[in-house]
Image (tube, rainbow, N blue to C red):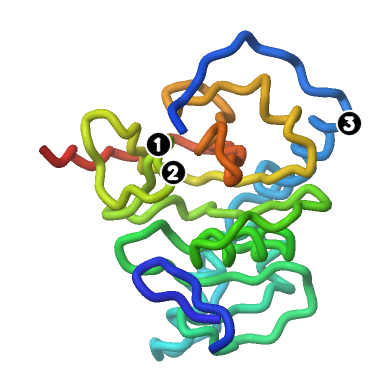
Amino acid sequence: MSISRGRFHVGGGAPGGCGFVQPSQVQWTLLLTAFAGFLLAGPALGAGEDGGATTESALIEEALSAAPPQVAETATVVDLEGNVLREGSGEYTCLPAPPGFGGPMCHDQQFMAWMQAFMNGEPAPPTTAIGTSYMLAGDSPDGGASNIDPQARTPTADNQWVVEGPHVMVISPDPAMLKGLPTTPSADGPYVMWPDSPYAHIMWPVAERPAQRPVVD
């Protein structure tokens, strides 16, 4: 696996409003559990290798800054070309920030498959369980994403571009879990990014949103 300009290489709709519908208690319990580690312990800033300022140790530290400590402790770390920088025993894989894209991120297995397919322009794979991705270092200042257009690469006046602060992304096998949530990033709390698309997912900010990028005329 490698990433080039924010795209993974593996091997060789408009927002709509709706009234709030409370998801089931089980769904919310799963969702809250997905990022409870951050609320309890905070991100693992500075969790990289001791000492040296080598490129590899800096990449490891950057990648692990996306995760809460208990995830970072056992995560595998890979670079943007797919080289394993640190073997891990846990479910999560952490990557440093792709240039001009988002920020460092740590995906569980469900979310990794989802992200690989999205970045390769492939159909969304079946989601068989709750999938989570930690981005507790937030988006890169020159990154972010359109909330309504998965293919957008720059902010415009009408594509709801958002540079998010520390947040957790969640995918669910149950589309009903997303239906009661806001579909714009202006909402306080969780919202749905790319609603009405196969890649709709929950964005859950957990800290203040940074300054936003200027729009492109």
Please state the horizontal and vertical placement of residue 12, each as a whole percent of the image: 54, 89
The residue indicated by pointer 3 is 26
Marking on residue 165: 2
Cβ–Cβ below 8 Å for labels 1 and 2?
Answer: yes
- Please state which of the two labelled residues, at mark 3 or mark 2, is closer to the viewer: 3
Q: Secondary structure at mark 3?
A: helix
**Disc with the residue nearer the chain's start (1 vs 3):** 3
* Position of residue 11 measured from the top left corner of the image (x, y, whole percent): 58, 85
The quarter of the picture where the C terminus appears is top left
- Cα–Cα span, label 3 and label 2: 27 Å
Quadrant hosting residue 66: bottom right
Circle 2: element type = loop
> Residue 213 at x, y = what percent?
23, 42
Quarter of image, res 216: top left
Identify the residue at image location x=44%, y=90%.
52
Query: Along the line of sight, which residue is nearer the eye, 65 or 148?
Result: 148
Q: Residue furthest left?
A: 217
Where is 194 relative to 85, above or below? above
Q: Earlier in the sequence, mark 1 or mark 2?
A: 2
Amino acid type, residue under disc 1 in the picture: Arg
Seen in the picture, residue 96 relative to 177 is either above or below; the reply is: below
At x 37%, y 41%, the residue is 146
Real-space Cα separation, disc 1 to disc 3, in angstroms: 28 Å
Identify the residue at the far top of this view.
19
Q: Amino acid at mark 3?
A: Val
The three-letter code of the residue at mark 2 reads Gly
Residue 53, given in percent of the width and then of the height, sits at 39, 87
Q: Which residue is mark 1?
A: 209
